[in-house]
Every structure is written in C-alpha cells, then in structure tokens.
C-alpha cells in the first residue's frame, strides 16, 4: 500500500469523522482565532507532511503517525544514549508466534507470553538486584492471499539492564517465551526469537530507535 491509497481508504471508510477529515482543511477553518499556523510542507528524514492542516492525531492515521513516530524516535534514542553512557547492557529482541487467521487470538497470545516474560524480570530484580527497563512495539504483517494463516503478529522490544547479568540472559528470554508453548501455538526457541546486543554506536542506536518508532 502507498500512503495515498491508505489515506483514501481512511477517508472513505473510517468510522471516526476526525480521521475522515484529517489533513483536508486548514486549522483556522475549525478555529478562526488560530490564524498563526500557515500551511507549510515539511520534509525531513522521516518523510514529508503538511502542517497547518487539521489533524486527527490518531496513532493509526498514516499521516499523523509520522509525527508521533518522529517524537518516539528521539525519546528512544536519547534513552539509549543515556543508558549506554552508564554502561548498561541493551538488547534488541524480536518475539514471534506462528501466523494465524484469528488476529484477536494472536493478540491474546502475545499478551500472555509478554506477561510471563515480565514475571521473569521481576525475578531478576528480587533475586539478583537487576533493574529491567523495556520499550516495545507491536508489528503486524499480513498476506491477503492466505486464508488460514493471514496475520503475523510479533513484538519488537528494547530491553535495558541496570548491569551485566551472572546468568545467561538470552537463554532466559528464550526459555520463558517458549514455556507458554501449546499444541496450537508452538514457537521454535531459536528460529522464533531473535536477540541482538545493541552496540554503543550511532548506527545501532538509530536503527533500533527507528524500528520501534514506526507505526
């Protein structure tokens, strides 16, 4: 899908009036007292957008999400810079489950597994005195040509530890995520999980921050 097609789809099908009218008229037509914001085309590393037009500010809007992504990117990058300046270990973790036709069931499955993973972070704090900080994003891909395995939901996460662990952190993540395996949802402990150590370089920090800021 192109941005133009997504916007046209939104304007024709969104149940919210604010999203249907997003970026269609100048702000001052809705609020005549606000005439200071002119219509301006802004171009930067994230793409382009017009300011001065009414915005729905919905995170699922293909136009407004760009602005939100830019703000989130800078927050994440500043957080990584601060953590690494204190020699904190940082990991970029991708956690998956098998494709399925039922998106609600996949959301429920991800929530359950993430909760179990958070319980292990509580254990690290109580038993080893290690603080764990996380930021995560839900990523959804789909193939319209599939009927029974259309949706693929997975989590991208940044995990920051207060200091190095005496236990195998990668093994802990894999064991905890796959512990919830059952007959209808089996995740391979190697191929279904990707864990990368984030290095203290501008390239790594930018790459990871952009990955988690996209909507």
Image (spheres, rainbow, N blue to C red):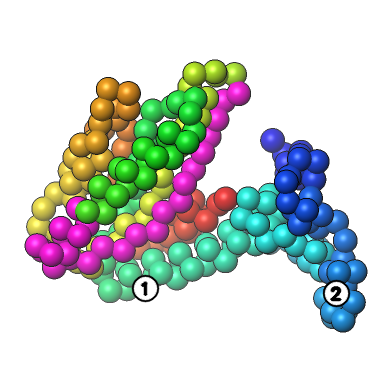
Residue at 41% over, 47% down: 156
Judged from the image, the secondary structure of the residue bearing numbered disc 2 is: loop
CA–CA distance in space, label 2 to label 1? 40 Å
Q: Can I make out residue 4 in this image?
A: no
Residue at 19% over, 40% down: 175
Where residue 182 sits, quadrant-wise, is top left
Instruction: Assign the N terminus to one quadrant of the image.
Output: top right
Q: Residues within 10 Å of mark 2 (few under 14, many from 20)?
A: few
Image position of 63 with respect to 7: above or below: below
Mark number for residue 182?
none
Residue at 63% over, 50% down: 60
In this view, the residue in front, 83 or 203, is: 83
Residue 44 picture location, percent across and down: 68, 61
Image position of 186 with respect to 125: above or below: above
Side (left or right) of 71 relative to 28? left
Is residue 46 within the magenta segment?
A: no
Identify the magenta region: 120-144
Image position of 117 with respect to 121: above or below: above
Residue 31 picture location, percent across and down: 85, 74
Where residue 198 sits, quadrant-wise, is bottom left
Judged from the image, the secondary structure of the residue bearing numbered disc 1 is: helix
Q: Which residue is mark 2?
A: 31
In this view, the residue in front, 203 or 180, is: 180
Q: Nearer the viewer, mark 2 or mark 1?
A: 2
Where residue 113 sits, quadrant-wise, is top left
């Amino acid at each position: 899908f192109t941005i133009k097609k997504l916007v046209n789809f939104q304007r024709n099908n969104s149940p919210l009036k604010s999203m249907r009218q997003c970026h269609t008229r100048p702000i001052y037509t809705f609020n005549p007292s606000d005439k200071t914001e002119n219509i301006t085309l802004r171009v930067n590393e994230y793409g382009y957008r017009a300011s001065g037009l009414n915005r729905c500010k919905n995170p699922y809007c293909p136009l407004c999400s760009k602005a939100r992504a830019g703000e989130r990117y800078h927050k994440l990058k500043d957080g990584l810079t601060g953590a690494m300046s204190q020699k904190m270990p940082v990991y970029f973790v991708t956690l998956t489950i098998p494709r399925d036709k039922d998106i609600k069931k996949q959301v429920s499955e991800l929530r359950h597994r993430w909760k179990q993973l958070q319980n292990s972070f509580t254990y690290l704090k109580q038993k080893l005195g290690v603080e764990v900080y996380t930021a995560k994003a839900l990523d959804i891909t789909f193939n319209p040509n599939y009927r029974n395995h259309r949706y693929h939901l997975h989590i991208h996460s940044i995990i920051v530890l207060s200091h190095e662990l005496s236990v195998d952190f990668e093994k802990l993540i894999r064991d905890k995520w796959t512990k919830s395996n059952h007959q209808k949802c089996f995740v391979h402990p190697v191929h279904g999980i990707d864990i990368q150590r984030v290095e203290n370089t501008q390239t790594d920090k930018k790459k990871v921050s952009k990955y988690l800021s996209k909507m």
